[in-house]
Amino acid sequence: MNKIIPVLMFLIILSTSFSAACNTMFSDELNIRVLDAKNRPLENATVTVTFQVDKTTAKGYTTTLPLLTSSDGTTYVKIQNLEQVSSNVDCNIVINAEYDGKTAKKTVIANSHENLIDLKLDVYSIFLTIKDSEGKLLEGALASANLIQSKTNNIGFTVLRVGAGTKTLFITYGGATRQYTVQVNDDTTYAVSFFLKDVVITVLDDYGNPLLSKASWSGKEYQSDANGKIIVPSIGVISPSITVIYQGLTKIPDMDLDRQTEYTVVFDMTPPKIISVVDKKENNLVKLLITIEDPGEYSSNVDPSSFSVRYDTGSGWNNAKAYKQGTDLYVAEMQGIELNSVVYFEIYVKDYDLNSVSLPGTFSVFEQDPDDNGDNGSEDPVSESDLLLPGAVLLIILLAIAYFLYTRTKKETISPEKETPPPEKPL
């Protein structure tokens, strides 16, 4: 009997304490911790808490917004009940935890629970070490499974916390991705190797001068040295899309790292040059024979599709039929050109790096001579030597005539008068 009395007293105290703890309009503070299958704190687990607001006014129950656990696996929430009728009070608080598809649920009584409420999930750790083919540990490699991600530290190590079951594991570094299917039912350790190559890019202008530039790859930028050389390290794919940048201009060279790892990228800064324009007339058809070059040792070359010529005889601009005929020879055909007219034209062309040039000009169409066989023009421009030779001959003739006239005039001027006979002596 003496033993029963203390027990009854304890139960009475506990009952009184419970009724006092969960009273009308109660409030409670909850410290919640989520653990994995090995009782380790689980970061970034999602926690929600469902509790009664009240019954009398039919507000019913509410659930908190999702809460994320911190690095020590914990989160905190304070709740408030508004029910004023004691018989309507529901003291049950339901806590839910979720991580990578695994869930846990726990119900506690308001103000009658542990100071730290633990929930345990069926989650394990995948320990990863990432290195290259020569054994160098790789920092910044990305490991992921479902929506869980983690990057390796400076010693090539990282941990993925994943739910139990079959998982597809992705390891990414240097643009390359390794994919593995793994069965998770306990902690697991993996070592992953990447075969990586360094790429060397030399950036030049069209005359072979180095350019201060940069390259962008996999979210990082690499600067060139004074010789225009850029080194992009640790690439794990055969055909990387590396962007080379110079003064806002960009190029993505085609690469095959199985064949070579050194490339030259040229930015052509010089527009094409129009060397000569010759008009050739055939009845009412006029052709412009145009020689165009793209200067520079590393030029991008003239883009034939960009070549165009427009012309105007006084009634408005027309587009000539323009095409490439030879290595540097381009032709523009103009229809409906009348005799004794002046034709205005404009030539436009660009190279493959979009440097462009335009050249305006005029030519005249005159009545044809009977002996010129219908060709008022010449396929070859007149040279200076062609003009100097007849001019020299004419000058010699003029000098000869002048000399002849000069000598004749002088002879008439100095001819002697008739001599007067001397006087006769007296006898």
Image (cartoon, rainbow, N blue to C red):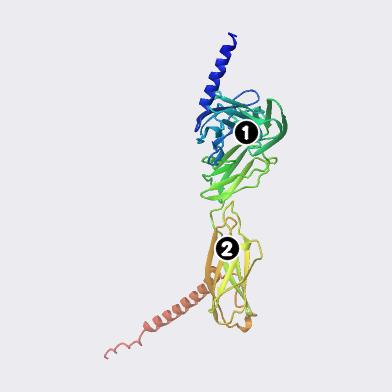
What is the C-alpha distance between the residues marked 1 and 2? 65 Å
- Give the quarter of the figure containing the N terminus: top right
| Crowd rating for badge 1 (residues with CA inside 10 Å; few <14, some 14–19, many 20+) | many
**For the view shown, which residue lies furthest in the top direction?**
2
Q: Which amino acid does label 2 sit on?
A: Val
The residue under the point 56% across, 65% down is 348
Say how many tags the image has: 2
Measuring from the top left, give residue 326's x and y in whole percent: 66, 63
- What label does residue 98 carry, if any? 1
User: Percent from the top left, x then y, of residue 173?
Assistant: 63, 36
Q: In this view, does 149 lie above or below 19?
A: below
Which residue lies at the image location 69% right of the left edge and 35% below the top edge?
A: 178
Q: How crowded is mark 2: few (under 14 residues within 10 Å), some or many (20 or more)?
A: many
The residue where tag 2 is placed is: 349
Above or below — where is 37 with respect to 98? above
Residue most extreme to the left: 426
Q: Is mark 1 on a helix, strand or loop?
A: strand
In front here: 227 or 29? 29
Contact, mark 1 vs mark 2 (Cβ under 8 Å): no
Q: Can residue 415 be seen in this view?
A: no
* Residue visible at 62% across and 39% down in the picture: 199
Quadrant (top left, top right, bottom left, bottom right) of the C terminus? bottom left
Q: 336 and 82: which one is in front?
A: 82
Q: Extreme front residue here?
A: 1
Q: Is residue 381 above or below residue 374?
A: above
Q: Nearer the viewer, mark 1 or mark 2?
A: 1
